[in-house]
Image (cartoon, helix red, strand yellow):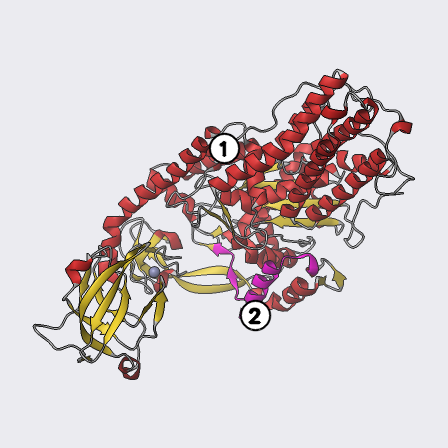
Amino acid sequence: MHPEHFSNTMRQYKRYLVTSALPYANGPLHIGHLAGAYLSADIYVRFQRLMGKDIVFICGSDENGAAITIKAMQEGVHPQQIVDKYHAQFKDTFSRIGISFDMYHRTSAPLHHETSQDFFRTLYKSGQFEEKESEQYYDEEAKQFLADRYIMGTCPRCGYEQAYGDQCEKCGSSLSPTDLIDPVSRLSGKKPVLRKTVHWYLPLDKYESWLKDWINTGNLDGTQQHDPEEWKNHVLGQCNSWLDGGLQPRAMTRDLDWGVDVPSDIKGHEGKKLYVWLDAPIGYISSTKQWAADNNKNWKRYWQDQDTALIHFIGKDNIVFHCLIFPAILKAHGGYVLPINVPANQFLNLEGKKISTSRNWAVWVHEYLDEIPNRQDELRYAMIKNMPEQKDSEFTWKGYQEAVNSELVNNLANFVNRVVVLTHKYYGGKVPDFDESTDIYGPDGIDDISFHDAELLRLFDDIQDMNEHIRSFDFRSGLKTLMEISTKGNQILQFNEPWKTIKEDPENVKVVMNLCLQYVAAIGIICRPFMPFTSDKIRQLLNQKPLTEKGELVKMLDQLAEGEVLLKKHHKIGEAIHLFTRIEDALIDTQINKLKAAEAVNTAANQTTESKEIQSIAPIKAEIAFDDFAKLDIRTATIINAEKIENADKLLKLTLDLGFEQRTVVSGIAEHYQPKDVIGRKVSLLANLAPRKMRGVTSQGMILMAENNEGKLSFISPDGNWENGQIIR
Ligand SMILES: [Zn+2]
């Protein structure tokens, strides 16, 4: 039989260009970043290298823009110091966790400045831009236009007084600087003035129709560029919701002081920088140029030849940027390929909450590597297992521990270790030879193929399944298949029990052990995309050279399909080493406590400002008609009995006298009042609220309470000795 190594349905490309989103150099990397754009790309790239493909993996630090100058201002240093710090940290962290970029570049490099300026010039000269005058805030004291982040003011939506010119961090609204009430310049602390300024816009509205067609059918200028069936649904969905909403012209320049200058040969360039929409994605191109220069390659083949498959790995917050805006820029320039896929991941949450840099609710990758050394693959494994491929997912330390202990230790490490130890015990560490004629024939009634050969073919099929998952960006399933292969290895060992049969049937044990060694050798290669450090260890304990990721997987598939073994008879293997060890509770507890401590610091820090804000803002709800109010039936009542509800810390079960009837009401006041303290209290009751069952008790209405900034409660009671059942209006 001859193997079909490649899926028939997928187009063949001569080369691949893979990019991961450029991380922004104003803070360290956390596991959410890793899960979004880096691990997935690394798996895919390592796999394609093992399949012998021509593939380049490109990334770099995004070092321009206002957030970096703001950070520099806060820390009292030059912006260059900020980007130098994080660029070095990113590079080191990625390398330590095994993200195998071919080039990790940076957008402060002169090569990048030149490349993006060339791009701008080409678009400008071919008349792609529209020039538009607008009014923007200007700081007369600092004598400069103010980027969105340089302006603070009161949010028009929620009243938060420290909203930024682009976003309110309190209510999450996205804003523009002119939306802010009482804007203040962060540079001088003065009120900014509006001034006229001119910018160059990319008319995305004009590209809407080809973008729609290209995204949804893959068709561009009459040729099939990609297969939308291979794109993730949530990616297509987000693109289409933007397209349906109508695209607007986007400014490609800004009045900024840190970034790539608008080329000086362009009239009106003074004080203007390229906006991130144009600057950052061109970082992929400049990074490729640097790689090509360093490796004596032609970068143009990777960007401008139609036989290149360009794939962008990103998080979902970058979808519009990579699926609509960057393709529009590339096509407006002309001569560039567009991505064949943008397999964006959704978000990874942490212990039930959104990861937050500002609240320090994160697992920082460099800290993980320092605090839990030599466990890179454990983190990779736990994250790939929970990768947010189709929907948001969650990382928990308990889940991490469970994945390592019950899967990596009990399954994979256990199998490999038993095979290595038994090989040393029975055969002095040499791969056993066996007599073909003693091999078992026909365990399932198949009598023309031996057990050994049949199992190797099954292994071949399983590996093909795994490969297919990786090719279609389904890395979770790929990892699952890898672990199933390890499980099958364990089962072969367990079923044949060589430790019991070594005496009476040594010939059969040779067959079984030889087969298991072939399994271990295969796992040493196929685990590589997911767990490169483990691959090195397995290769070491089999006394094989580390993989160079140059076609080793495709070679192995050829061997298996031809019925050849991966480890030759009498090959001497290495000594047993532990692939994985158990994660103890103490380690997990330390990490969980660290998160709790970060949360406590935040709560304390926020409390003072928080209460002040609530006090000053207390947003008024949307207006209602009198008729809406008239629907509420509020009555005076007296609490005549109160008792705690079992297993509900916050709830009291109250009996109310309304004069004409008695009612049971469940109220969330148990943390504020003891039952004995509320009996006899006069209250206001919303009496026509639909009954609701809480903890098995049906509540017939709701008691009205006032709540202050600290969350304290107070009853709303009529004065004096008022009768029950009277109407409040
Ligand atoms: Zn707000």
> Residue 99 placed where, x, y %?
59, 36
Identify the residue under disc 1.
88
Identify the residue under disc 2.
244
Q: Number of labelled discs?
A: 2
In the image, taking residue 509 as reference, residue 686 lies left or right, namely left
Q: Quadrant of residue 100?
A: top right
> In the depicted view, which residue is nearer to us: 636 or 27?
636
Q: Is residue 242 at least partly visible in the picture?
A: yes
Label drawn at residue 105? none
Residue at mark 2: C-beta within 8 A of ligand 1: no
Range drawn in magenta: 229-253
Residue 721 lies, with reference to residue 8, above or below; the image says below
Does the magenta segment cover residue 239? yes
The quarter of the picture where the C terminus appears is bottom left
Real-space Cα separation, disc 1 to disc 2, in angstroms: 41 Å
> Residue 87 placed where, x, y %?
50, 36
Q: Quadrant of residue 711?
A: bottom left
Residue sitting at x 41%, y 47% = 356
> What amino acid type is highlighted by mark number 1?
Ala
Q: Secondary structure at mark 2?
A: helix
> Residue 333 placed where, x, y %?
64, 56
